[in-house]
Amino acid sequence: MPKRSDISSVMVIGSGPIVIGQACEFDYSGTQACRVLKAEGLRVVLVNSNPATIMTDPEFADATYVEPITPEYVERIIAKERPDALLPTLGGQTALNTAIALHHAGVLDKYGVELIGADVEAIERGENREKFRSIVEAIGGQSAQSIICHTLEECFAATEDLGYPVVVRPSFTMGGAGSGIAYNPDDLARIAGAGLQASPTTEVLLEESIIGWKEFELELMRDRNDNVVVVCSIENLDPMGVHTGDSITVAPSLTLTDREYQHMRDVGIDIIRAVGVDTGGCNIQFAINPDDGRMIVIEMNPRVSRSSALASKATGFPIAKIAARLAIGYTLDEIPNDITEKTPASFEPTLDYIVVKIPRFAFEKFPGADTTLTTTMKSVGEAMAIGRSFPESLQKALRSMERPSAVFSWPTKSIDISNLLNRMRRPHDGRLLLVQQALWAGAGIDAVYEATGIDPWFLDQITQINEMADAISGSEALDRPTLFEAKQMGFSDEQIGHLRGLSEDEVRELRHSWGMRPVYKTVDTCAAEFEAATPYHYSSYDEEDESRPSDRDKVIILGSGPNRIGQGIEFDYSCVHAALALSDAGYETIMVNCNPETVSTDYDTSDRLYFEPLTCEDVLEVVHAEQTRGHVAGVIVQLGGQTPLGLAQRLADAGVPIVGTSPAAIHLAEERGAFGEVLARAGLPAPDHGTAGSFVEAKAIAARIGYPILVRPSYVLGGRGMEIVYDDAMLADYLQRSTDVTSEHPVLVDRFLDDAIEIDVDALFDGEELYLAGVMEHIEEAGIHSGDSACALPPITLGASDIERIRESTMGIARGVGVRGLLNVQFALVADTLFVLEANPRASRTVPFVSKATGVQVAKAAARIMLGESVKQLRIEGLLPAFGDGGNLPVGSAIAVKEAVLPFGRFHGVDSVLGPEMKSTGEVMGIDDSFGIAFAKSQQGAFAGGLPTSGTAFVSLANRDKRAAVLPIKRLADLGFHIMATQGTADVLRRNGIEVEVLRKQHEGPSADGVRTTVEVIMAGGIDLIINTPYGVGPRVDGYEIRTAAVMMGVPCVTTVQGLSAAVQGIDALVAADPGVRSLQEHAAALAKLRQLQEAADD
Amino acid sequence: MRIVNPRGSGSLDYVVRNPSRISSNWRAQRSLDEELRDFGVVGISGVDTRALTRHLREAGAMRVGIFSGAASRRSPDDLLEAVRASPGMVGANLTEEVTTDQVYTIAAIGEPIATVVAVDLGIKSMTPHRMAERGITVHVVPATIGWEGIVAFNPDGVFFSNGPGDPAAADHAVALMTSALEAKIPVFGICFGNQILGRALGLPTYKLRFGHRGINQPVQDLTTGKVEVTAHNHGFAVQAPVGEVFETPFGGARVSHVCLNDGVVEGLELVDGSAFSVQYHPEAAAGPHDASYLFDRFASALSPVGGR
């Protein structure tokens, strides 16, 4: 059946901001879908609030709406665009839930929009646990025994049948949010209470525990002709009890017999048919009892999921792309397999390699968070590796984590085995290392299996790695066969060096002297049965090399590795843009990355893809392979964040041509002393600072420059361990906690600029001309990490002279450092002095936001400049505007507001107050003509519900904020808000004529005459907006309970006085009128018109 | 050097890159090594199996020798000579090497609905089991049996199994098939049996340059248009016109299934439904169960209560 002729325009809904459980894999799937639909000649209307996505690039859709993904906004877009169909299955749970809400509200019927990809009944059969359960039973499968509950009382009654432990799963939440395992009634009250709250249908499922069983997933696709294929099987190394997103997983499944696998496949196929997913993909999870093979169906996602992205990268079978084609009417046998080009998609990929995925966690960012892995996902990113054996793949994946502590090491065998066995009983982020260490120390597979439930097959494989380590360190000389065998088992040169007392470089020299290098194999969906047209490669130490480097001029782009807080999709965005721009400019583009969630690791993005860890060794080998033929014009390290930047010097030392800003120039910007000189030469002020190796030294510096000060360890990046300190006592406390401070690892002490306006600048520099891409004014004051701060572009309170000073200062730094390409500078404006806080000679997190807000493809231009093009030439070509830049946007330009999205809902007990250490996982953009509406949209995009327009506001302020807060609070009261406050704040507000109801503090408890505490009122749902500005940091600080309750109840919580002003402006705007919607294409056209007027006026 | 698996199809060696040194499954009874020894199958490991596959993909199927011990210390030229001297598959009649010596019977599971004679050309044990599951009593008979021997069982249908060798050399099996068609007894064939049906219908067979192997081959049922993912292991195929009914001595016939990867004929049937066969392995051991409906279809052809 060919393409349907009755659909000419399709709306695609994206997944919104990156959050735990819903990350850039949906940018990958959504981008694929948009590409396919456009290629099929359909008009594509896209809505996604996340500006950091590739899919929201104006070229991927005909009308791109960066607007909040709520039924209200999507309805406005539908009313305006009138699409024929809505494809909701590629934007995660967010898109699916929005589409269902629109259906139930009658919006789709009203505007004649057909839901394609899955119908509402099928989605509900897949997602509603009772319906799904009855389907599993009807097809002869088994479900875990379970009971649906709608109240806590029902939950307690249910445990009389199910016993403890019992699994709690809320309905209709994503990434397992709110689910957990209850071992006793207290656990149950806590987990099920939160789960009922998190479920949009106030429904949780209690289920018999199958913890410790083997866990599997199948990715299936079905077309409207009822053809079904199983694209991939995935096995979790961590048994049941750990969310699959937090598990180490392998593909294909490795410990099933054919009979077990085929049974699982049969049941999977029966389920997709019975649920009725008839044009798209789904994911089904299974548990198998290792003792008798009993198989239980856990759940299904009737849509493209995180696992689909992994399966696509693992097999080369592009699930989202094919799902989009199926949705518009094609059948599987009509769609060609992308990779072979000659065979149809109606087949099942065969893998002749092993894929290992390892999650990356960020617990160090959230002191106090429980690191136990449960059925609620907690990881923030993942890396995938491909190898010809499990040991090779596992070790490649471990070094892809980019954490020295993540790779296996063999320090000493005098290990307390029983201690390790005890610690590994609790699933947590470091468990695999404990397993490896225990096996190495001789714990035995049986004991480790008993403690962890990890299948003995995996444990034996890890044992083989340990045996290899012994062979490396035990052999008399490092001979050639031993080295080769070690490389086949995935040992890095560095690991081998550690075992032999050699440096990494010495091992590499020895290896190269024997001509021992990896070969590159191809991911081809068919285990070499057919020729592959797509060069998607991975390294292995094996016999035959398949890479066929071309003789063209090529550029190698290094990606950003696994997502983490501070380095996520924004960097992938820049890498993808470089690939697109350089391909257009005639280069062959080569991508190196190991993050399966991304668009950069889509084999469609660049000319050649190497799915490899981003370590010096692995990158050098790729460069060597490409240098065997043709000319490598250069390697780009500026776009993937700190990961490739950190490799720059070593690559350059090895003779690799780095394009753009040179490693020496990078050093100038990154090394504190050198950068100080750059600033001094340019006559630019920086905050007073010093370096301390002890508390005494730190105290002396503090005395010199005055409190408050900003302190941080010198050897980490991304704001890790950074705190604002207000007095000697806090300083002593900080240094006591930072036990590893020495004169070799000193603490950096900076004067903290209180009440400063923080400004973020992204610019392009070609050696002559500076293109100021964007100037962003932070809404929160300096001291909150720029990644967590909301910001506005164009800056809302800066004058033209401020911008000119920013331009000159940026130019001075760009020249002084020697930037070629992108430069990000952070400034602080205090009492008319513009301080330079830091400069990063690389793509920043804000590049995509700036690109969307100003309608200019900044990363594309940067890539061209790195390869030697001038700003002037790019203005002529049209990649940059002919006139003006992001620093002098015409008056009347739309205002874009970026807001950060924070993961506190995942980490109970962690204080939600913001500080200098970045904690956000993602961002949204709100764009409109006025700041108020743009800000309100950013809040609606970032949090369920957004800003309230009526109800009750609770206020509790630090003394220093009380004066500034009076006016905005008064405005809230005038808008009709009922104001509640703690006693001190209430006194001030009353004296200013604001009517206030007083609440008691948590430690005071409720009063005898019935006055409740703030937390009680919040938990009872009696507060709609919380304004709580804290003083200092740490969980003992007053307000912690309030903020924690706010997170639990999902009440918006403003923690700065500047944030309060912005919120009141937003509320004001919302009360005045419903915001309209406008596409980026319309914004760009309006801006172009304004620029023309500006240019004419200028002449 | 060809090792023939007495219960399986064709000649088998076992090549693996990384054999697992332990088994870890509740169904496991012994190690891979023990299993191979029991069946007398030679196994080698540490080979870049992907490179081997790519070589075969480029150069086509070929004979192979595996040498060990003193034999392997000869010169490469000598070894190559030894491989070249081994018999090739074209023209090989291997049926007698693999067929059963004696008749054996697989009892129907549950209430018997029909009786089938299965001509063992190298039958896999799962095949009669799949029939028995559907209430069919299966008498597995040596390939050397005469037609009268088959008739003596008074069967409701005759089955022709998979097996090794060149179908062009399998004259006796073709003669048995012809007799079955003439007798209008329902006939079902798998793999080699498909080629035998093809020859009995007067169609030629040929050796594929790239044989079909593996458990992920997309086959389209031309009657329904639906695609099934199937297990294949065949180096020969039947040549027949696709998409039309052609006349045979036993009435009109047509191609029922084709492989979507390369268009190779994967199934044949008489239009009246009395005989049909597929080139692949619906018994699926190992492999997906998508094509198990063919056993139901056979059961229906045998008995009005079949296909339960």
Image (tube, coloured by chain):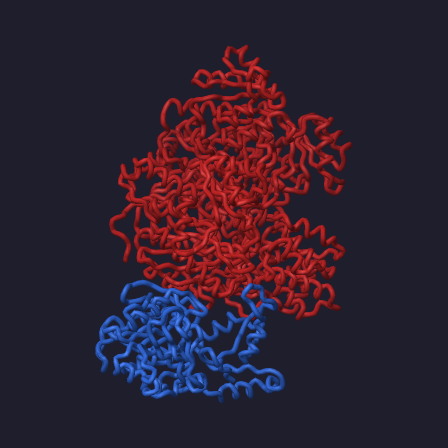
Chain colours: A red, B blue
Q: Is residue A188 left or right of residue A224?
A: right
Q: Is residue A755 above or below residue B57?
A: above
Q: Residue at x 41, y 80 (%)?
A: B163
Q: Which quadrant of the view contains residue B183?
A: bottom left
Q: Is residue B13 above or below residue A1096?
A: below
Closer to the camera, B192 or A852?
B192
Q: Is residue B247 above or below residue A845?
A: below
Instruction: Say if residue A127 shows up in the picture.
Output: yes
Percent of width and height locating residue A71: 37, 35
Q: Is residue A454 left or right of residue B185?
A: right
Q: Is residue A32 left or right of residue A801?
A: left
Percent of width and height locating residue B140: 40, 80
Q: Which quadrant of the view contains residue A333?
A: bottom left
Instruction: Say if residue A869 shows up in the picture.
Output: no
Percent of width and height locating residue A775: 50, 33
Q: Quadrant of the C terminus of chain B?
A: bottom left
